[in-house]
Amino acid sequence: MPERCGHCGFAGDLDEVARPVVRTQRSMTDLYGEIETRIYWFLYRCGRCGKATLEEDRWCDEFSDPEDETAVQLFPASQDNSAIPDAVKRPYWEANRIKGDAPGLYAVGMRKTIEAICKDKGARGSLKRMLDRLGEEGGLPAPLVEMGHQLRERGNLGAHAEDVEVSAEDVPVIEEFVEAVLEYIYRAPAKIAAAQASLEARKASAAG
């Protein structure tokens, strides 16, 4: 079962809706002869936001252990957020919980997320000044600085009574921009470091 809903971040148990066998694989072994591995799709429904999460897992009667964690999340595409600090993840998940129900508050939450990112990178002042400073000092490239300003402006609309309000049409834009900033600041450097470590380990193994 997924650790949390990939849509809203709910960390409670998700409701299992279905687990069909989508295909089978047969192979020969010395010990058991022909064995069958069944590939399942597990469909879950979040009790908070009602959206679906889909996982794939496999089972072989002869070799599988129910204690092994072998499931792979297919939908929504899972993100490794382990490199993101808790001070950033908290407003991020809080905003995701209301994404489908309150676009204005979602925008406010994602503005708070961007503010937490700026503070984590050492910037101080107003959010506008922090974003500009990160751009000036090379912490963010110009397109991501502009994305940050777009998020700041939409967050301001969500926080105040204005003639122009945040709508459901803004939600995909907000989500895409926040994910781009998170990818650049946290996820991509972590992936690069992991890939480099793996390469260095392979080189050391080959040299030994």
Image (cartoon, helix red, strand yellow):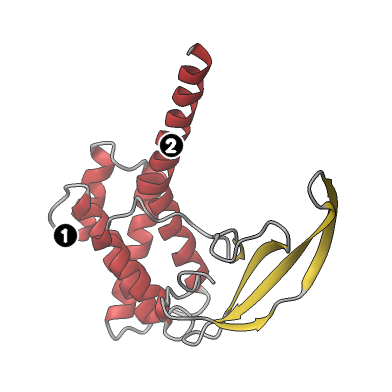
Q: Position of residue 13 (x, y in %)?
A: 47, 81
Secondary structure at badge 1 equals loop
Q: Position of residue 115 (x, y in %)?
A: 24, 61
Left or right position of 130 against 102: left
Q: Position of residue 19 (x, y in %)?
A: 71, 77
| Disc 1 and disc 2 in contact, CB within 8 angstroms | no
Residue at (82, 63) in percent of width and height = 23
Q: Quadrant of the N terminus?
A: bottom right
**30 sits to left or right of 132:** right
Q: Is residue 24 above or below residue 120?
A: below
Which residue is at the front of the view, 173 or 73? 73
The image quadrant of residue 163 is bottom left
Mark with earlier residue (1, 2): 1
Q: Can residue 128 be seen from the camera position used here?
A: yes
Give residue 18's position: percent from left, percent from top.
69, 81
Q: At label 2, which amino acid type do we have?
A: Ala
Outermost residue toward the top in this view? 207
Disc 1 or disc 2, which is closer to the eye?
Answer: 2
- Crowding around mark 2 (Cα neighbors within 10 Å: few <14, some 14 to 19, many 20+) is few
Amino acid type at image mark 1? Ser
Residue lying farthest left? Answer: 125
Q: Residue at x 37, y 43 (%)?
A: 142
C-alpha span from label 1 to label 2: 34 Å
State whether residue 111 appears in this view.
Answer: no
Q: Residue at x 12, y 56 (%)?
A: 125
**Which residue is denoted by mark 2 in the rendering?**
194
> Mark 1 highlights which residue?
126
Callout 1 environment at 10 Å: few (<14), some (14 to 19), or many (20+)?
few
Q: What is the tally of numbered marks visible in this picture?
A: 2
Name the residue: 55% across, 86% down: 50
Disc 2, SS: helix
